[in-house]
Amino acid sequence: MARAIVLVIDSFGIGYSPDAVDFGDVGANTLANLARAYFETTGKKIALPNLSAMGLIKACQEASKQEFPYQGHEPTKGAYGYAEEISTGKDTPSGHWEMAGVPVLFDWGYFTDKENSFPSSLIDTINQTTGFDGMLGNCHASGTEILKRLGEQHIKTGLPICYTSADSVFQIAAHEEHFGLDNLYKYCETVRELLSDLNIGRVIARPFIGDHADNFARTGNRRDYSVLPPAPTVLDKISQAGTHVISVGKIADIFAHQGIDEKTKATGLDALFDATLDHINTAKDNSLIFTNLVNFDQDFGHRRDAIGYAKELEALDARMPELFKTMAEDDLLFLTADHGCDPTWPGTEHTREYVPVIAYHQLIGSVNIGNRKTFADLGQTIAELFKVEAMDYGKSFLTELYNDKSSK
């Protein structure tokens, strides 16, 4: 049986979705707006020849109902479309679970207060259970800003830095050497248990290094502690049926390690891409390789760095021919995203957007698969590809991928 590769360009939205008004995101368009900012700043048009040949620019134009800031290559290979999210939030677990066939149709719990974000009763319980006499932060913050503000105090006091955001998340930053990775993970595991009644989606360990505010930097030893999806995902189904499911990056954490048979961690675009290529080179038939390229989101989207985001996209585009060359004749590649994070948009949070749905196979010409009404269409397509029971949500587009259906 053929192999499949799913490449999630984390935060790569291509136009605000129909319900963006409910999120204050009307006008957001991660791809188009960063391309426009890149041109205005550098005088250069963003160079995405491989992705645009797969239909990315066309998908963005159709999703946003407007012309792209520059005319990219016309689609020549691969199927292209755009999907809207039906989950209630615009967070990482919701986006990934929905693309795996299980949308989040309930409301997460949130810490909505910008300051003094966590209930005093929760803080008291955390302190009593972990043995610490306090915590720093207790607010909404960006991950880099809070290190500059509280990193030195953290080293001096030994207290963890705890903060949140508009997502359903409890984040804990601690120095890898002064606090210790194992201590950070243990602290996070304890907090994860204590949040079970509040319906908080993730606890995230955010380790960092450095010795003063000017050089603090987060490391690749991040770890996400997620609750389980509300139902079995397509990963569970295909794994139980004998497909070897391989996670690259933070995928295993997002799915609480359910439906994952093998996992690889890596830091940075090149390392994540290299790990994906390594698995393509070695994985046997009947395998799914599922990769999350987190740096687009955490290093550029949340930091509102449009120029950095554009350059990272160009770097990804430049490496796509390596992936094509590595793929076997029957392999099928999917490119998508979990939400938007427009680096030109006010604030530092995710944006409610359509995401691209692009599929590449050596036998696929240029095929427009249009507006997909849920991210779950991808999960349904994977279910059909690996011949397991259909998911409850989504519509497969597997047949649409081939101009000549007899070549399927």
Image: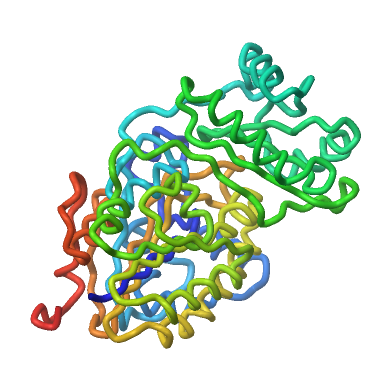
**Residue 2 image position (x, y, % from top left):** 26, 76
**Residue 191 image position (x, y, % from top left):** 60, 29
Q: Give the residue at x 45% y 62%.
A: 262
Q: With respect to residue 256, does 406 lie above or below? A: below
Left or right of residue 316, residue 326 in this image: left
Left or right of residue 253, residue 183 in this image: right
Q: With respect to residue 320, does 84 lie above or below? A: above
**Residue 140 image position (x, y, % from top left):** 65, 31
Q: Give the residue at x 85% y 52%.
A: 210
Query: Which residue is the extreme one toward the top?
Result: 121
Q: What colour scheme was applied to this rendering of the protein?
A: rainbow
Q: Give the residue at x 44% y 81%.
A: 281
Query: Which residue is the extreme one toward the left?
Result: 406
Q: Is any part of residue 273 visible from this angle?
A: yes
Q: Is any part of residue 32 visible from this angle?
A: no
> Front-most of 286 and 277?
286
Q: How many discs appear? A: 0
Left or right of residue 273, residue 359 in this image: left
Q: Give the residue at x 45% y 61%.
A: 247
Q: With respect to residue 375, does 159 lie above or below? A: above
Q: Quadrant of the C terminus?
A: bottom left
Q: Quadrant of residue 126?
A: top right
**Residue 338 image position (x, y, % from top left):** 42, 52
Q: Quadrant of the N terminus?
A: bottom left
> Front-most of 6 and 114?
6
Q: With respect to residue 75, does 120 lie above or below? A: above
Left or right of residue 153, residue 385 in this image: left
